[in-house]
Amino acid sequence: MVGSNDIERSKRFYNEVLGVLGISEATPNIADSGHTRLIYGNGNGTNFIVTQPINDEPATVANGGTVAFSCDSPEQVKRLHDVAVTAGGTSIEAAPGPRNTASMGTIELAYFRDPDGNKLCGIHFPA
C-alpha cells in the first residue's frame, strides 16, 4: 500500500503502469473513514493498494522503502519503466537494465517514482 495526495492522478498513473503487467484497472473502495482507496488485484490473491491517508495528513514516501513489481521478462521491465515515465513518473537511479548480484546472478531492474514520490521498480529474475 502506498499513499496518495491526488487519488485521481494516482488512478490514471497506476491504471496505465499496472496494465503493462496485465493487472486490471483499480476497484475503488471507500474506507469506513470515508477515504478513497484504489485496489489492484492480479487474481492470485496479490493486491496493491493506493490510499488517501486516513489521518488526513499529507501522504509521504517511505525512506528506504521500495515496492517491486515482478515482470515476466527483461523487456517487460523496460516497458513498465517507460510507461511509468510517460504517465507522469520519474526515472531514478541507473537506467533500466541488468544488474549483477552475487547471490542471484543477473537480474533486470528499473527504478522509478510515482507522481507522489513513492519508489517503485520492475524486476525480473533469471529462470
Image (cartoon, rainbow, N blue to C red):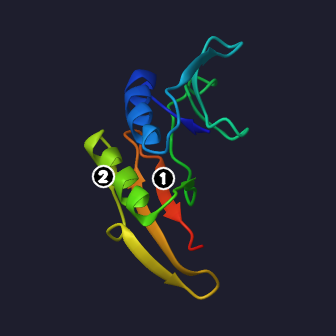
Q: Residue lying furthest left in this view?
A: 86
CA separation in Å, label 1 and label 2: 13 Å
* Percent coordinates x, y for residue 118 in the rendering: 47, 47
Q: Which mark is residue 82?
A: 2
Q: Earlier in the sequence, mark 1 or mark 2?
A: 2
Name the image quarter holding the N terminus: top right
Choose between 126 and 37: the one closer to the eye.
Answer: 126
Query: 52 left or right of 13?
Result: right
* Percent coordinates x, y for residue 67 in the rendering: 56, 52
Q: Of tags 1 and 2, which is closer to the observer?
A: 2
Residue 62 is at least partly visible in this image: yes
Please, what is the three-letter code of the amino acid marked with disc 1?
Leu
Identify the residue shown where x is 42% and y is 76%. 98
Choose between 95 and 63: the one closer to the eye.
Answer: 95
Looking at the picture, does residue 23 appear above or below residue 69? above
Crowding around mark 2 (Cα neighbors within 10 Å: few <14, some 14 to 19, many 20+) is: some
Residue 36 is at least partly visible in this image: no
* Percent coordinates x, y for residue 104 in the rendering: 62, 80
Circle 1 is placed at which residue position?
Answer: 120
Dividing the picture into quadrants, the one containing residue 39 is top right
Count all numbered tags in the image, as a single digit.
Answer: 2
Name the image quarter holding the C terminus: bottom right
Identify the residue shown where x is 64% and y is 85%. 103
Query: 90 left or right of 120?
Result: left
Query: 65 left or right of 10?
Result: right
Looking at the picture, does residue 29 appear above or below residue 10? above
Choose between 45 and 3: the one closer to the eye.
Answer: 45
Q: Secondary structure at mark 1?
A: strand
Please, what is the three-letter code of the amino acid marked with disc 2?
Asp
Identify the residue shown where x is 49% and y is 84%. 100
